[in-house]
Image: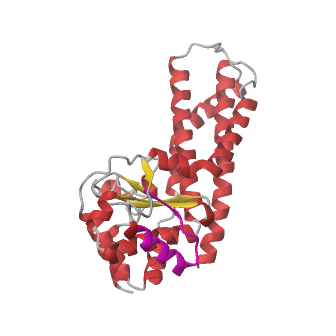
Amino acid sequence: MMFDAIAANRRRSYVLLLAFVVLIVGIAYVFDLYYEIGHYLVVPAAAFALFMAWGSYYYSDKIVLSMSRARPVTKQEQPYLWNTVEGLSLAAGLPTPRLYVIDDSAPNAFATGRDPQHAAIAVTTGLLQKLNRLELEGVIGHEMSHIGNYDIRFMTLVSVLVGTVVLLSDWMMRSLWYGGGRRSRSRGGASGILLLVGLLFVILSPIIAQLMQFALSRQREFLADASAAKLTRYPEGLASALEKLAADTEPLEVANKATAHLYIINPLTEHKGWANRLFSTHPPVEERIARLRAM
């Protein structure tokens, strides 16, 4: 099952990069068509999309860590955290990831990177203060499982690429709404239909981008929970940690729509009622706890 998940995550990452390029080129094509300026924007847009795809693949972890205001932490500063991560890395047979701390009292954590050799784990100061040793091991075990299963590559790419698509679509819509441009008032039937389809494409691009986020299967969280329980040999540690995280109502100030799906519990939907949780990238925390305690 784990090897199937790794292979699936690799495929999804490449499909996501291709979908991103197609979306950006499509937005540029609609812009060209609407303003009747030829196809001068398509080639630059394709170059931009390819550059962003390349940059996201190699540097998305740095972008996400910067967006989250995570700072690197030394072993001298947090020896307890370092020892926990080093021990679980050894048990999982993975390189020790880089460690970061987010100065926020809300307890949470996430992993990022493109592969186990270029991975990082970020935890909030609230997590370190509010969890005991076994609970912290459970959370770190969960994040180590995301690293080992290559979830981090796909999840981190989604953060950067989806955010880019949403911003560009918003800029495009504002340009079409407020811009004058060289728009023709009389278009042929085929051209008019093509333009209408194109405009619909631009309007739906943010929704398509959000659907990319929902492509993050909830099963990957269940798999990471189960892998963490196997790694620590103590399911109750993670179950108790999830219970504390779900009960803590302090808002995570650095969270946003682009990065929320990375965290062990979604900081934007967990305390927002059943309607928001219905569309969360994470399964209900109560179900995750029940599964862990049934092991």
- Expressed as whole percent of the image width and height from the top left, the position of residue 167 reads 52, 35
Q: Residue placed at 53% from the left, 28% from the top?
A: 171
- Expressed as whole percent of the image width and height from the top left, the position of residue 291 reads 37, 80
- 262 and 24: which is toward the camera: 262
Q: Residue placed at 66% from the left, 15% from the top?
A: 186
Magenta: main secondary structure equals helix
- 53 and 20: which is toward the camera: 53
Quadrant of the frame with the N terminus: bottom right
User: How many marks can you see?
Assistant: 0
Position above or below: 219 against 170: below
Task: Work out whether residue 208 can be spotted.
Answer: no
- Expressed as whole percent of the image width and height from the top left, the position of residue 150 reads 59, 66
Answer whether residue 169 is magenta in the image.
Answer: no
- 283 and 268: which is toward the camera: 268
Position above or below: 268 against 230: above
Position above or below: 53 against 177: below
Left or right of 140 on screen, residue 239: left
Residues drawn in magenta? 81-100
Task: Work out whether residue 201 can be spotted.
Answer: yes
Question: Which color mode does the image show?
Answer: secondary structure
Answer whether residue 87 is magenta in the image.
Answer: yes
Left or right of 270 on screen, residue 226: right
Left or right of 112 on screen, residue 109: left
- 274 and 238: which is toward the camera: 238
Q: Residue placed at 61% from the left, 30% from the top?
A: 196
Q: Quadrant of residue 135?
A: bottom left
Position above or below: 181 against 262: above
- Expressed as whole percent of the image width and height from the top left, the position of residue 159 reads 52, 49
Quadrant of the frame with the C terminus: bottom left
